[in-house]
Amino acid sequence: MHYAWVVAFTGTLVLLLAQGFGRMSYSVILPPMKEGLHLTYTQVGLIGTGNFVGYLCLALLGGFLAVRFGPRKTILVSMIVMGITLFLTGLAASFSHAFLLRLITGMGNGGAVVPVMGLTATWFAAKKRGLAAGILTAGTGLGLSLMGLLLPRFMAGFGTAGWRYAWFLLGSAVFALSFVCFALLRDHPREKGTSIYGGEHETEARRTDVSFFSAWGEVLRASEIWKLGAVYFMFGVSYIIYVTFFVAYLGSESGLTPRKAGEVFALLGLCSILSGVLWGWVSDVLGRRHGLMLAYIVLAASYLVFALWRSMPGFYVSAVVFGLCMSSIPAIMAAAAGDSVGGKLAPAALGLITLLFGIGQSIGPALAGWIKDGTGTFSWAFILSAGVSLLGAAGSLMLKKKV
């Protein structure tokens, strides 16, 4: 077996820990944490925004640090930071305390995710890159499923303090497993005495002396990267509203118990496990821009169903449709960034487009919380997500045909 597959499946573990444990768990922990700290929905939205602001800051810098110091070391340090701050979130005593810790957790999240996604361009040739990125994103779906199934039951065993013990558990797991990821990852095929999987790429063979500052210059001058970033921004705004307030919406507006809401959330995660693989393959066949357009349309449909079909069948349909498409955009974006600038610069390019994605993520939760407090329902926030997603579909057609 080519070692590229070891890197890919280790990347799946990184995404499980960073995205599933570090980010998506907040949706499940949010309701009891809100009650425990006596927060408003605007405040819980701002805590979510704090996490994504941190992600935004390190997503850009992390990609360029990976170019300078290597993805492997950057990922290790980022995951250690994430593990420590997740644990400390369990000790939060106020809104400001929780906001700060989630901000730092987001920084660790961005510093891990961008470099590991960029590794697909280093280890896999273009014709295999969408599939490889999809394999990595399966970790996000697996993490979502585990959070929805296990956390409600785990928290119930500790009463009103259950949300604190959930953070303790997640932080300990991320910290310990970060060293397993470090042991298995490698920055380049040369380190294992092999070559890129799927065929050597001419550009990859020449680019061996890219520095931190030259990477900045080359990526900032690439117009196609800015187009990708603008399209990725739409995903950041739209999907994060849905994921952050999924469980809260089912509980506060639909009367579902935390366990039942967690089961629907787990179904979403289960359906999403192979979504990146599926859509990465679709983009390898149809091209990145048509893959992105189709994915955005499907996502918009899932948001509208969730907002307008307010019954158990509607919730299940929305969860399944969204799950089958959840990792589509990140997988295609990781492949498209590598296509545009090559494997050596891929982490830096992915960092730049993730900056715009992160801005969208930072806006989404606070905006949705404000809409909820103002209208009394999350439905309008989900309708907004659908509209933004359709803008992303239209923007995808402005990309070059080769992407």
Image (tube, rainbow, N blue to C red):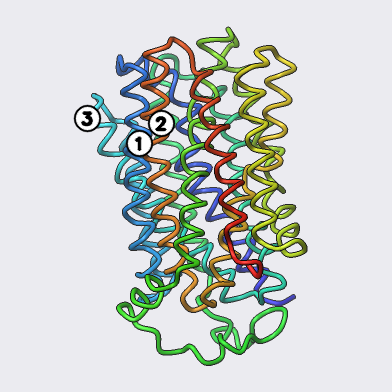
* Figure check: 233 above or below 206: above
- Which quarter of the figure is the C terminus placed in? bottom right
Q: Which residue is mark 2?
A: 365
Q: Say which quarter of the image contains residue 10.
A: bottom right
Q: In what element is the residue under mark 3?
A: helix
Q: Are marks 2 and 1 in contact (CB under 8 Å)?
A: yes
- Going by the numbered disc 1, the residue's amino acid type is Thr
Question: Which sits in the foreground, 18 or 247?
Answer: 247
Left or right of residue 98: residue 220: right
Q: Which residue is mark 3?
A: 96
* Residue 137 pos. (x, y %): 61, 53
Separation of residues labelled 2 and 3 (CA atoms): 16 Å
Earlier along the polypeptide chain: callout 2 or callout 3? 3
Q: Residue at x 40, y 20 (%)?
A: 371
- Going by the numbered disc 2, the residue's amino acid type is Pro
* Figure check: 204 above or below 276: below
* Figure check: 162 above or below 73: above
- Which quarter of the figure is the N terminus placed in? bottom right
Earlier along the polypeptide chain: callout 2 or callout 1? 1
Left or right of residue 139: residue 294: right
Check disc 3: other Cα within 10 Å, few if <14, some if 14-19, many if 20+. few
Q: Which residue is mark 1?
A: 49
Q: In what element is the residue under mark 2?
A: helix
